[in-house]
């Protein structure tokens, strides 16, 4: 028998399944890369901001040197935007990094991590990587059931993940509900409020989570530059929390976890209000385009507050995988979500007008 390395809980990890890269689909199905439409990873269809591109080109001159390990300029941009002290900020190699750091910093093997059914797959991975017991609370209408999550707290609970809006379902928790939840969670339990899609929220539902960080020393808000800011490939995100949390995260992060180009681009993007507004507007238009088409095709979808829509493409267990394969053959990449326990559904990222149209046309053909 061969030697088994590492603990059982590490060997049991099922690796994260991302969206298929365009190059891979081109090879696999004999298509031209330029004919392929990728609506699979909630990326910004506008590409990266020009302001960020410029900042990166300028930063290239210094690439022989290590990055600023404290990310002074990027933290300064965050301080100016959110009005928090520098010490409250943890920079991450994507906000994924922040989620993992939280699990490593606050959870020991056999302690409990709570998250919702159908919430972001990284919560399960982060919990499992540290040998935690995952407490998965059944969803309500495909979203978080915060009352049930509060009821799931035990003496062993150390960390709770909440995504608002949630991925892959796009559901949204109103501010009042989150605030009520924060009030009842014991102060020794860290709550991660993952706001990867916050910038897409309309002004009517937008809320001030940073104000909650001031009130609740056990709250960690995570943000990313990967979605509305258009920098997914650079890997940069950040966490905001009081020093009791952020000090520990900064101790265990890699010293240079955010590279120089990412730092320079992120500063430019955070200050690029025009790009952000344009992204949000394009997204709102694309959402209407997609959901009108789903309505016309009589397809069920979950109302979404993010830059993607979860749509039910059939009533049998094989529907999502089957429709996904048929779409791939037509050069349309979306995300099957069978691994989330949603085998009848597909998650479609909102793209440019013509990309959405190509997807709708292909979907009509497949379902005809
Ligand atoms: C995309 C996403 C993230 C993080 O992405 P990064 O690229 O690692 O910043 C975090 N949470 C949710 C819910 C997401 O959908």
Image (tube, grey):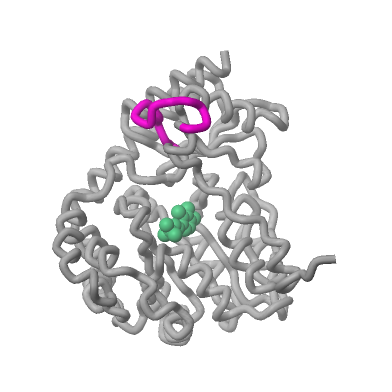
Provide residue 114's location: percent of width, then percent of height: 65, 66
Q: Which residue occupies 20% across, 60% down?
A: 56
Q: Ligand 1, what quadrant?
A: bottom left
| Quarter of the rendering containing residue 268 | bottom left
Q: Is residue 164 visible?
A: no
**Lateral position of residue 190 relative to residue 199, left or right:** right
Q: Which residue occupies 53% across, 67% down?
A: 180
Residue reaching furthest to the top: 368
Q: Viewer-proximal residue, 68 or 349? A: 68
**Lateral position of residue 70 relative to residue 124, left or right:** left
**Lateral position of residue 69 relative to residue 318, left or right:** left
Provide residue 363's location: percent of width, then percent of height: 50, 22
Q: Is residue 136 above or below residue 362?
A: below
Q: Which residue occupies 57% across, 73% down?
A: 103
Provide residue 211's location: percent of width, then percent of height: 37, 72
Q: Viewer-proximal residue, 274 or 46? A: 46
Residue 35 lies in the magenta-colored region: yes
**Lateral position of residue 140 relative to residue 205, left or right:** right
Region rendered in magenta: 27-39
Q: Is residue 37 above or below residue 20?
A: above
Provide residue 30's location: percent of width, then percent of height: 47, 25
Q: Is residue 221 visible?
A: yes
Q: Viewer-proximal residue, 350 or 187? A: 350
Q: Is residue 13 above or below residue 303?
A: below
């Amino acid at each position: 028998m061969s030697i088994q390395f590492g603990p059982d809980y590490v060997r049991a990890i099922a690796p994260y399944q991302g969206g298929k890269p365009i190059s891979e689909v081109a090879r696999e199905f004999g298509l031209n890369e330029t004919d392929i439409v990728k609506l699979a990873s909630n990326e910004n269809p506008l590409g990266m901001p020009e302001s960020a591109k410029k900042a990166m080109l300028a930063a290239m001159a210094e690439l022989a040197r290590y990055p600023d390990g404290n990310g002074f300029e990027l933290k300064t941009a965050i301080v100016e935007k959110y009005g928090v002290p520098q010490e409250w900020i943890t920079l991450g190699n994507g906000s994924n990094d922040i989620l993992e750091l939280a699990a490593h910093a606050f959870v020991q093997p056999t302690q409990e991590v709570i998250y919702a059914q159908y919430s972001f797959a990284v919560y399960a991975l982060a919990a499992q990587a540290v040998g935690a017991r995952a407490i998965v609370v059944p969803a309500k209408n495909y979203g978080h059931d915060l009352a049930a999550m509060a009821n799931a707290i035990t003496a062993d609970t150390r960390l709770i993940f909440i995504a608002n809006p949630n991925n892959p379902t796009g559901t949204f928790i109103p501010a009042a509900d989150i605030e009520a939840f924060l009030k009842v969670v014991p102060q020794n339990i860290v709550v991660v409020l993952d706001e990867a899609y916050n910038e897409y929220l309309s002004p009517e539902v937008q809320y001030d989570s940073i104000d909650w960080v001031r009130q609740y020393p056990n709250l960690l808000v995570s943000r990313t530059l990967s979605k509305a800011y258009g920098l997914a490939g650079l890997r940069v995100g950040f966490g905001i929390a009081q020093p009791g949390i952020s000090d520990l995260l900064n101790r265990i992060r890699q010293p240079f976890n955010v590279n120089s180009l990412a730092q320079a681009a992120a500063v430019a993007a955070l200050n690029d209000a025009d790009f952000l507004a344009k992204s949000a507007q394009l997204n709102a238009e694309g959402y209407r385009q997609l959901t009108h088409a789903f309505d016309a095709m009589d397809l069920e979808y979950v109302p979404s507050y993010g830059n993607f829509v979860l749509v039910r493409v059939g009533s049998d267990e094989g529907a999502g995988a089957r429709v996904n394969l048929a779409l791939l053959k037509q050069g349309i990449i979306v995300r099957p979500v069978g691994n989330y326990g949603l085998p009848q559904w597909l998650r479609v990222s909102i793209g440019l007008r013509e990309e959405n149209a190509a997807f709708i046309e292909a979907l009509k053909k497949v379902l005809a």
